[in-house]
Amino acid sequence: MKVLVINCGSSSLKYQVIDSETEHVLAKGLCERIGIDGVLTYQPAGQDKIKYEAAMPAHRQAVELVLKQLTDPQNGVLKSIDEIEAVGHRMVHGGEKFACSTLLDEEVLQTVEDLNDLAPLHNPPTLVGVRACKEILPDTPMVGVFDTAFHQTMPASAFIYALPYEYYEKYGMRRYGFHGTSHKFVAQRTAEIMGKKPEDVKVIVCHLGNGASISAVDGGKCVETSMGLTPLEGLIMGTRSGDIDPTCIEYIAHKEGITLEDTMQIINKKSGVLGISGVSSDFRDLEAAADEGNERAQLALDAFCHHVVKYIGSYIAVMNGVDAIVFTAGIGENAPLVRKAVLGHFKYMGLEVDPINDSIHGDECMISTADSKVKAYVIPTNEELAICRDTVEIVTKKTIEDVVKKVLG
Ligand code: AMP
């Protein structure tokens, strides 16, 4: 089955076409500056990337241009758009309504829309993208894969905030967690590599990218995660503060004489390792600056690792043990120094880092020694493939149900 995977932002749209049988990416690309002017990037497998300007006043035109490009007689990868048998959409916030991926019919879209208050920046553009796709491909099944879904198995003791309970009841204020598609994919792959069933392993997944989160996965189910009501909570990130005393927000607004909205911008966009270092949000820049003796860049790296260690330690306690600690996403896959600094704190449990760690940049690899009691791995995440797999599963199930219904009358 050929699946179009779409990830919509407010002014961007990332896409991939994946052949679900081979799990090969046939083409991928990005539409940027939607609603401004429009730039399309397109890369068929094994060929050079092409990039050109094209008017994209709204997401609908972006989707039309992507389909035109995919079916282009010269460098397209599809003969016609009918070859797309399903579309998988990355959805950000499913609240408590979606604990798994689902077919996107009008009722479901309305439910997602009702959750817009929980993710005002992310859910509305996603819905715009889905509706644009539905208009252009009205007969193609669409599946929504939610960032929050995998974390819905957390027990109430882990997700409840110690606020007046009525805020949970009235406004849905609780920990939801994000990057769920990645945490699920990596946790499942960890069990596979270890030659065990997901039910039999305790895994801590460290998704360390520009946005960063950690989850504790016990027996295949998420029992804790570091992000909260929004992706702001938890680890120190590229530009997000992660955990701080909430009073800091009032204090900054008061001292700087700025509004709550402006303060939140600072907490989201100017904090994290960028805020500490004053250098960059990118770990490559931070490592280079620290090597040259920049003390604040070093402090940002140290603080980042310290928080990762703190979370891992607490999640080991939550699960009453751990079998594997796994690193993924931009920093997790590419920064051996971060992995080494973090894992050095778990020597006491019999986790020995293998020197191979130093040479691993983006490849799947065990980075603990073979006789290590607790294992450590680098496992590249692949959210698009995870969305494709879920999409195929849901569409196939629906097709079977339809056939059975028809046969039984
Ligand atoms: P992501 O959000 O998963 O795409 O991760 C992006 C982040 O990964 C960048 O901002 C960098 O901080 C980090 N990163 C990417 N490549 C490297 C590298 N070779 N060494 C250290 N950090 C890296």
Image (cartoon, rainbow, N blue to C red):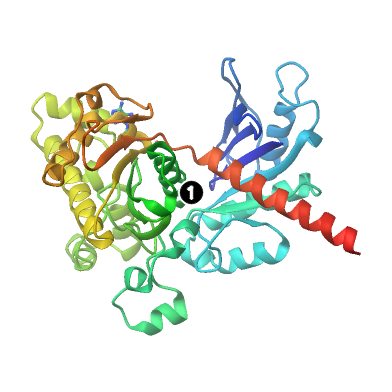
Does 70 appear above or below 236? above
Residue 409 visible in the snapshot: yes
Name the amino acid, label 1. Answer: Thr
Query: Quarter of the picture for ligand 1?
Result: top left
Residue at image position (65%, 62%) is 109
Q: Position of residue 66 (x, y in %)?
A: 68, 33
Residue 238 visible in the snapshot: no
Question: For the residue carrying disc 1, how many other residues have a C-alpha within 10 Å: few (<14), some (14-19), or many (20+)?
Answer: many
Is 236 situated left or right of 8 in this image?
left
Q: Position of residue 33 (x, y in %)?
A: 55, 37
Q: Residue furthest right?
A: 409
Is 327 situated left or right of 142 in this image?
left
The residue indicated by pointer 1 is 181
**In-front residue for pair 318/97:** 318
Local secondary structure at mark 1: helix
Does 225 appear above or below 293? below
Is 158 situated left or right of 345 in this image?
right
- Tell me the quarter of the image containing the N terminus: top right
To which quarter of the image does residue 354 belong?
top left
Residue at image position (60%, 31%) is 23
Residue at image position (53%, 64%) is 116
To which quarter of the image does residue 7 belong?
top right
Q: Position of residue 74 (x, y in %)?
A: 74, 16
